[in-house]
Image (cartoon, grey):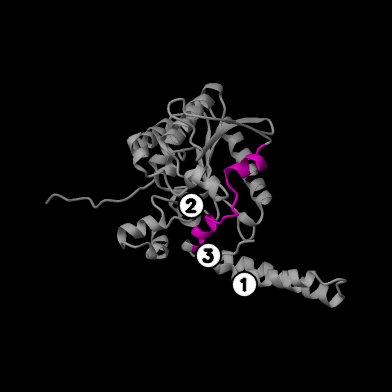
Amino acid sequence: MDYLAFEQPIADLEAEIKKLEQEDPPSAATAEQIRLLRQELNQTVRQIFENLTPWQIVQVSRHKDRPHTVDYLSLVFDEFVELHGDRKFGDDRAIRTGFARMDNLKLMVIGHQKGRNLKERSENYFGCAHPEGYRKAMSKMRMAEKYGLPVVCFIDTPGAYPGIGAEERGQAQVIAENMLEMSRLRTPIVCVVIGEGGSGGALGIGVGDRVAMLQYSYYSVISPEGCAGILWKSHEFAERAAGALKFTSKHLLGFGVVDDVIEEPAGGAHRDHHHMAASIRNYLKRNLRELIAQPVDRLLQNRYEKFRRMGQFLEPVETIA
């Protein structure tokens, strides 16, 4: 287990338990001590993770052991067949697409993929997709619409790739087109933020009938480092920016930006991939069955109204003397 800085009390307790468990043969006193330490460990984990700061939540969302899209493809779904390429430029490995089955539900799944090791992360551009990745996503969504398949999107990116080549190939335009097309796609769409939900890179596959986020993920117009770089000209203020952005699941549920928060296992999704996958599977099954039962025209109207309700504000009314 790779521990974050604020998890040091957890690391100390787990190390002590592991040391006691190596005693051979274990005595009754040792077994009782282990039991008490496990109780203390559970209390410590709960206390720490119930009081995480926004910056600590960002660290959890980026944990190297946190499940990625490819992990959920094997844990959430019974089958998955990957589809490649945008039919125009290439196959962006930062976005994975394909047919999936979950019980008797046939789906189209689309998600960002960061990669585990340096080779995979370099190949996937650390989850930062190029225009061809978003074009691939949209072409597969249109295919899903044609065959009447619901769409599931897993969002996990610090943002779209910011390089010159991506801009030359129309990065901003293709993200805007995806948002437009998703808003009127005639099939149910469920989006889940599983880690980082950064900027337009997240919105490019983030328009859905249901938008949920995991408990220790974040969803924001910009990353904390990017915000700090703009406002304070230094990434050293990232923690301060994280607190100001109000981008955690608790904040966004209250603002109405997301519809649901999926609870994570004690200590975060990186501690129990199977438990987290089971929770996501249950959420998808419940919501997809509800959405599939709706007439398409009503589905689209509800989707339109859902996003129109966001960002409400009040203006003073000027009186004419």
Q: Which residue is mark 2?
A: 253
Marks 3 and 1 in Cβ contact (< 8 Å): no
Residue 62 spot, x, y in % from top left: 52, 55
Callout 1 secondary element: helix
On residue 45, the disc is: none
Residue 128 spot, x, y in % from top left: 45, 44
Is residue 20 left or right of 113 when viewed as pictured? Answer: right
Residue 247 spot, x, y in % from top left: 44, 55
Marks 3 and 2 in Cβ contact (< 8 Å): no
Say if residue 186 shows up in the picture.
Answer: no
Against 64, is 94 above or below? above
Residue 68 in magenta stretch: yes
What type is the residue that disc 1 sits on? Pro
Q: Which residue is mark 1?
A: 9
Q: From which residue to which does the magenta span run?
A: 56-77
Q: Which residue is mark 3?
A: 52
What type is the residue that disc 2 sits on? Leu
Q: Earlier in the sequence, mark 3 or mark 2?
A: 3
Q: Residue at x 67, y 51 (%)?
A: 275
Extreme residue toward the top, this view: 146
Callout 3 secondary element: loop
For discs 1 and 2, the disc positioned in front in the rendered view: 1
